Image: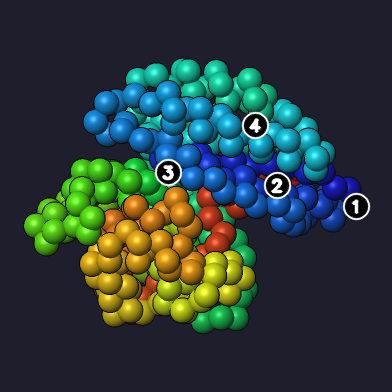
Amino acid sequence: MSTKSVAAIDCGTNSIRLLISSVISLDEDEVQLLDVERRMEIVRLGQGVDKTGAFAPEALERTFSALRGYAELMREHGVGFGPESVRMVATSATRDAANRQEFVDGVRSIIGVEPEVISGDEEAELSFIGATAELEGADDGFKPPFLVVDIGGGSTEFVLGYAGDEEAGVVRAARSVNIGCVRMTERHLTQDPPTAEQIAAATADIDAALDEAAAAVPLDEAATVVCVAGTATTVAGIAEDLPEYDPDRIHHTQVSAERTHAIAEELLAMPHDRRAAIGVMHPGRVDVIGAGALVLDRVVSRTGAGGFVASEHDILDGIAWSLCLSELPE
């Protein structure tokens, strides 16, 4: 048996997250992945990108500052600074930014590898692996096919596939569309709280994007809708009336479609101070949670599912698994 440490980094429009894992090689064809450290920083890398087409200097510096802290953690846990041990993916805003080379050069200088500017489909597939790997053989009533939904700051990814049966690991369809909590807030929900007209405009934009997604991914065929990332986990924490954010209690929480809709309406009607006072609310999510909850509500409604399952495991875990699986022989 051998072990090594790997680091997965997910840089989105709103946040940058780190997962350090221990890869345990049990034998020549089996490895195990154990969490060592999870971190998240709200950096708003995508600040203004929808309007300007470029990263703001202050957004780049916030992101680089967070990465320097992550690099220190990686050193503490013995992660090697190379492509065999570190993988960083960058999404949505990075695909759109005119000055993305400045971002790439800064990342390389801090963690030793370049960020991978992956497509929306690749992002969706990594999210699917991360969200469903542990569902294989689970006795929790979660049935395939699974629709994994990743609501980010600038985009939302959908992937439909199987895990836990003879078709484990099969991804049937995936699509990324440009709706996310930051993008919808900046584009439509500019008042606090937003007006009915602004909410209607955002809803129309979201529904049009869902039409686009449904053309590639049969959203209504999912037996289980698994929602990952901060919007879904925050809504799940609110549904559970938790006094503070508790990932262990939130993980695999099931929220009904009716409760999801009610929470979205409540968040959109609340002023900033009331949202900030919610126990599970991360300070960096206060300004965009209304838009995120609206996206989540429209997604659940569109699938026709009775609700969604919140997962704390997502693209970060998929990235770590991709490093983990590299340990296996061809």
| Tag 4 and tag 3, C-beta contact below 8 Å | no
Outermost residue on the left side: it is 197
Q: Is residue 292 visible?
A: no
Mark 3 burial class by Cα count in 10 Å: few <14, some 14-19, many 20+: many
326 vs 32: above or below: above
Count every numbered label the image shows and give the total: 4
Q: Is mark 3 on a helix, strand or loop?
A: loop
Q: Earlier in the sequence, mark 3 or mark 1?
A: 1
Residue pointed to by mark 1? 1
- Residue 128: give x, y in percent of width and height: 49, 55
In 3D space, how far apart are the residues under numbered discs 2 and 4 (Cα atoms)? 15 Å
Residue pointed to by mark 3? 14
Q: Which of marks 2 and 1 is nearer the N terminus?
A: 1
> In the image, what residue type sits under mark 4?
Arg
> In the image, what residue type sits under mark 3?
Asn
Number of the front mark, 3 or 2: 3
In 3D space, how far apart are the residues under numbered discs 3 and 1 (Cα atoms)? 39 Å
For the point 38% across and 56% down, the residue is: 286
Q: Is mark 4 on a helix, strand or loop?
A: helix
- Residue 75: give x, y in percent of width and height: 78, 35
Q: Residue 20 carries which label?
A: 2
Q: Which mark is residue 68?
A: 4
